Image (spheres, helix red, strand yellow):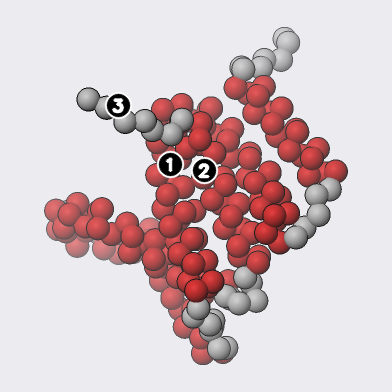
Amino acid sequence: MREVRTAPIWLLAMLPPLFSAGNFVLARALHADIPPIALSFWRWTIALTILLPFVAAGLWRQRDLIRRHWALLTLFAIVAIGLPPLAVLYAWELSTGPGFAIHAVNLVAIGYVALFPSVLAYFFWNRAVAEMGPNRTGQYMHLMPVFAAGLAILLLGERLQAFHVAGALLIAAGIVLAARGFRTAG
């Protein structure tokens, strides 16, 4: 029987901050093409659509409980996901402006933010936490500014500055020290 190889767990811990950095850089790159509220609305609408098949059976089994506590669950949904208020804001945005052009670049951008930072990042992060523990995994989140700077340099034409290098080195040193269990004297 052939052994199935999976990605190293540290790679799974690095992907969520990379996906989040990609989200920030993409939103900045396309802010003139896709208004922020539209991007956010479609991001969470599509993410919910992606996740719904995985939770539909459980929701159906719990429908009586959901019916009894619908008001509280609605409040949690508004606070946690924010989709109902986003829908109102998006409707207002559409009434005051032209919206955004539907073409391949915009659709790919919306697809990226809906799938990678909104769904896959959470899946990979939770898997990394389960394998490495929350303390070790949490250190990888500090890579987000390094990835954001790198992506901005590559995709937005920003120039590499000394503070980028200094920040990346300090972040790397902090991760290494945390991974080795650095302890202060005393």
Secondary structure beneath label 1:
helix
Residue that mark 2 sits on: 15
Query: Gap in Å between the C-alphas at discs 1 and 2?
Result: 7 Å
- Whether tag 1 and tag 2 are in contact, CB under 8 A, the answer is yes
Residue 29 location, x and y as percent?
65, 67
Q: Which mark is nearer the camera, 3 or 1?
A: 3
Secondary structure beneath label 3:
loop
Q: Amino acid at mark 3?
A: Glu
Q: Which labelled disc corresponds to residue 3?
A: 3
Quadrant assignment for the C terminus: top right
Q: Earlier in the sequence, mark 1 or mark 2?
A: 2
Q: Is residue 19 above or below residue 184?
A: below
Secondary structure beneath label 2:
helix
Residue that mark 1 sits on: 124
Q: Is residue 11 above or below residue 120?
A: above
Q: Residue at x 51, y 45 (%)?
A: 16
Q: Earlier in the sequence, mark 3 or mark 2?
A: 3
Between residues 73 and 17, which one lies in front from this camera angle? 17
Give the side of residue 46 with respect to residue 53, left or right.
right
Give the side of residue 87 with respect to residue 51, left or right.
right
Q: Amino acid at mark 2?
A: Leu
Between residues 8 and 70, which one lies in front from this camera angle? 8
